Amino acid sequence: MATGQGDRTGRRVGELAAATGLTVRTLHYYEEIGLLVPSARTYAGHRLYDDADVARLYRICVLRRLGLPLVEIGRALEEPAWNLRAAMTAHLGELDRRLEAMGRLRSRLAGLLGSIGTGDSRLTHDLLTTVEEMTMLDTAVQGRIMLLVYEDIGAAHDWLVRVFGLGPGRVDRNDEGRAVHAELQAGDGVIWLHQEQDDWGLGSPQSVGAATACVAVMVDDVDAHYRHAVSEGASVVHEPVDQPYGYREYSARDLEGHLWSFMKPLD
């Protein structure tokens, strides 16, 4: 239900969070980066979101499902050709396809129940087909993106390309020219470089004094990669070695202390 004070009406942030399943922290962050700014506030200063804000939030959620980073979503939201009806139609089509697939899976499972214990030779084949259909339906996780936090994103991007040979990607800067987001290619994956953010507890190893994770990257030639990294000034943790778990590997730290391992399966 809309909440208002005087002639100011709309949904407060807690109501919007409860209605959408998003967290208040997420909505505050969207406001902080200019993605979803409430259209009004109460006289007491509470945020109020009107119907246009709700429609904008729907657009954000749809684009997030498509895997777009927040920076690109912000640009897409300003695109005048974007059509809410077309987006909802596409979303509805996606749901219809999932429902159709679930119906096929249900019918197949019902048929399999009748085949158990009958000695039907097709049972194994049908089970494999069922597993395939289950896998295709399991789309809650669409992919993964590694996110690393740096004090100086621009310098980190250039260093990682030059020293570790990662593929260069986009670098987004604010009005002052400071890099606030960057992307790198690592084989078939992508790595995002994120700025430090105290309220989310995000800090560079250079700031917190420790690395809490390690990035493992597959390379064609571990020793050649090691020699290049050393020549470019990488801080080596250990030289190339054949590990008992079946990989040749070396480890090094980057310019802000993130730990990296470069490896290849042993023949």
Image (cartoon, rainbow, N blue to C red):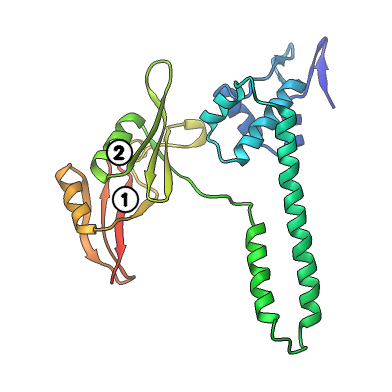
Q: Position of residue 146 (x, y in %)?
A: 44, 46
61 vs 49, nearest the viewer: 61
User: Mark 2, mark 1: which one is toward the viewer?
Assistant: 1
Crowding at label 2, few (<14), some or many (≥20) Cα neighbours within 10 Å?
some
Label 2 – label 1 distance at C-alpha: 12 Å
Q: Is residue 210 left or right of residue 16?
A: left
Q: Position of residue 174 (x, y in %)?
A: 43, 20
Residue 247, quarter of the rendered image = bottom left
- At a point 17% along the width and 42% down the height, the residue shown is 233
Query: Which amino acid type corresponds to the residue marked 1 in the rendered image?
Result: Trp
Q: Residue farthest to the bottom?
A: 119
Q: The C terminus lies in which quarter of the figure?
A: bottom left
Residue 48, quarter of the rendered image = top right
Q: Residue farthest to the right?
A: 1
User: Measured along the vertical axis of the image, is residue 88 above or below residue 260?
Assistant: above
1 vs 167, nearest the viewer: 167
Q: Position of residue 122 (x, y in %)?
A: 70, 82
Q: Tag 2's secondary structure?
A: loop
> Can residue 49 be seen?
no
- At a point 79% along the width and 77% down the height, the residue shown is 113
- At a point 24% along the width and 58% down the height, the residue shown is 222
User: Measured along the vertical axis of the image, is residue 172 above or below residue 127?
Assistant: above
Q: The N terminus lies in which quarter of the figure?
A: top right
> Contact (CB < 8 A) between labels 2 and 1?
no
Rendered image: mark on residue 260 = 1
23 vs 120, nearest the viewer: 120
User: Measured along the vertical axis of the image, is residue 191 above or below residue 76?
Assistant: below
Residue bearing the label numbered 2: 256
Q: Tag 1's secondary structure?
A: strand
Q: Is residue 226 left or right of residue 122?
A: left
Query: Which amino acid type corresponds to the residue marked 2 in the rendered image?
Result: Glu
